[in-house]
């Protein structure tokens, strides 16, 4: 029986030690993420939580695991899904209107092309296992660590595969955060930059991994670029739900062909909850103070899930993954830069 299933079946008191542990890691990570230096460098609470979890998971947690495993499993499964649902409170349908059809088409093309490239390159060219390729592709094409975590139940990935995928998001999202502003300034000074500040903000939001990294990169250029980047990124995040449903159907179809038997589709019900929350939030029925409180709660839930993931990730498994996952992430990063720019320019020319 896996840890996540244990967390769902055991009575609540047995979950407490693991929940207290993950909540402590989450709280410290959220506090640390408010420090000026970490904020300036786009290091989010989720990133800090998984790093802290991995450190503890390979040291002190080995002694705590017998008592804490049930709650850790619950955080990694149930709290993650609750966090994805509440993530919808960060978005509204009005966000789509602000970027227009052009922004939506750019987001969709970047998402589909990046994920398809990850699947093909990862499995056919680099010889990675399918789950690792899909998780890395999800993190690069949608919304970083949150997308990796949301995709894991659909592909049924292992903890170490998820951790490797999150690591690629941290490395290349952080690199993008510094590179994009430099690229824009260099392009403007050299006279070849084809996008204005707002246009480059859309490019940033459509191609950079994490929301926090998008904010840092966009605002480093200008406030209009930052606003366009964040809105475009939020629309990209909104595509998470249809992506998960489509991926589940695609995987089930592939399994049916391989086995000759009809395979059931894994319905990610939390994805529908996410969409429902976006729609509800668009009605603006809740006071802004309550929405902020729920968004803060969502950050706690996701940070607890990331901490739980880190606690169950063994460094030896990460080492066994080798250089291929990072090479795939490098190739996807190059595509996001070059291919993402071509998609932006092509869609703008046509629309």
Image: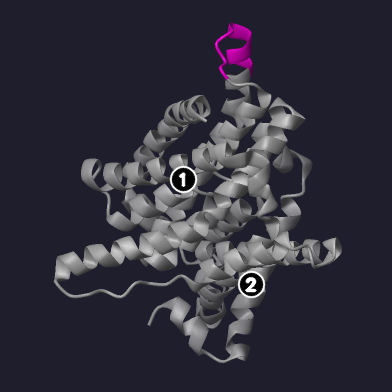
In the figure, residue 213 lies in which quadrant?
A: top right
Q: Nearer the viewer, residue 101 or 60?
A: 101
Q: Is residue 8 above or below residue 46?
A: below
Q: Nearer the viewer, residue 284 or 50?
A: 284
State the image coordinates of residue 182 (x, y, percent, origin top left): 61, 21
User: Which callout, 1 or 2, points to the residue nearer the camera?
Assistant: 1
In the picture of the structure, the residue carrying the numbered disc 2 is: 21
Image quarter of the N terminus: bottom left
Q: Is residue 235 toward the left or the right of residue 128 in the image? A: right
Of pointers 1 and 2, the one earlier in the residue sequence: 2
- Helix, strand or loop for disc 1: helix
Determine the CA span between mark 1 and mark 2.
31 Å
Q: Residue furthest left?
A: 260
The overriding secondary structure of the stretch rendered in magenta is: helix
In the picture of the structure, the residue carrying the numbered disc 1 is: 141
- The answer to whether residue 323 is visible is no
Query: Residue at image x 79%, y 67%?
Result: 285
- Helix, strand or loop for disc 2: helix
Q: Nearer the viewer, residue 228 or 84?
A: 228
Query: Residue at image x 57%, y 41%?
Result: 101
Q: Is residue 345 toward the left or the right of residue 275 in the image? A: left
State the image coordinates of residue 181 (x, y, percent, origin top left): 63, 25
Highlighted range, magenta: 185-194
Q: Is residue 9 above or below residue 68?
A: below
Do the numbered discs 1 and 2 sit on residues whose CB atoms are within 8 Å? no
């Amino acid at each position: 029986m896996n840890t996540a299933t244990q967390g769902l079946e055991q009575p609540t008191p047995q979950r407490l030690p693991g929940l207290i542990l993950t909540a402590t890691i989450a709280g410290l990570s959220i506090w640390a993420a408010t420090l000026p230096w970490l904020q300036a460098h786009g290091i989010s609470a989720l990133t800090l939580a998984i790093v802290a979890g991995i450190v503890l998971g390979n040291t002190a947690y080995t002694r705590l695991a017998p008592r804490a495993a049930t709650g850790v499993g619950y955080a990694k499964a149930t709290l993650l899904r609750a966090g994805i649902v509440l993530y919808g409170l960060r978005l509204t349908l009005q966000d789509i209107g602000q970027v227009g059809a052009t922004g939506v088409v750019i987001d969709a093309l970047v998402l589909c092309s990046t994920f398809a490239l990850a699947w093909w390159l990862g499995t056919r060219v680099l010889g990675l296992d399918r789950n690792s390729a899909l998780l890395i592709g999800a993190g690069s094409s949608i919304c970083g660590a949150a997308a990796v975590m949301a995709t894991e139940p659909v592909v049924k990935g292992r903890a170490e595969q998820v951790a490797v995928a999150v690591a690629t998001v941290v490395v290349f999202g952080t690199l993008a955060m510094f590179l994009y502003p430099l690229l824009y300034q260099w392009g403007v000074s050299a006279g070849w930059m084809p996008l204005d500040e707002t246009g480059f903000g859309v490019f940033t939001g459509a191609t950079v991994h994490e929301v926090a990294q998008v904010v840092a990169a966009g605002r480093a250029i200008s406030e209009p670029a930052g606003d366009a980047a964040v809105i475009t990124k939020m629309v990209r995040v909104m595509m998470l739900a249809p992506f998960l449903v489509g991926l589940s159907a695609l995987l089930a179809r592939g399994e049916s062909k391989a086995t000759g038997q009809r395979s059931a589709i894994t319905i990610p019900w939390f994805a529908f909850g996410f969409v429902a929350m976006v729609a509800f939030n668009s009605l603006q029925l809740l006071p802004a103070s309550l929405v902020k409180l729920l968004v803060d709660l969502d950050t706690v839930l996701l940070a607890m899930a990331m901490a739980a993931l880190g606690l169950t990730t063994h460094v030896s498994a990460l080492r066994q993954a080798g250089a291929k996952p990072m090479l795939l992430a490098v190739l996807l990063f190059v595509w996001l830069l070059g291919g993402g720019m071509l998609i932006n320019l092509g869609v703008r020319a046509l629309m």
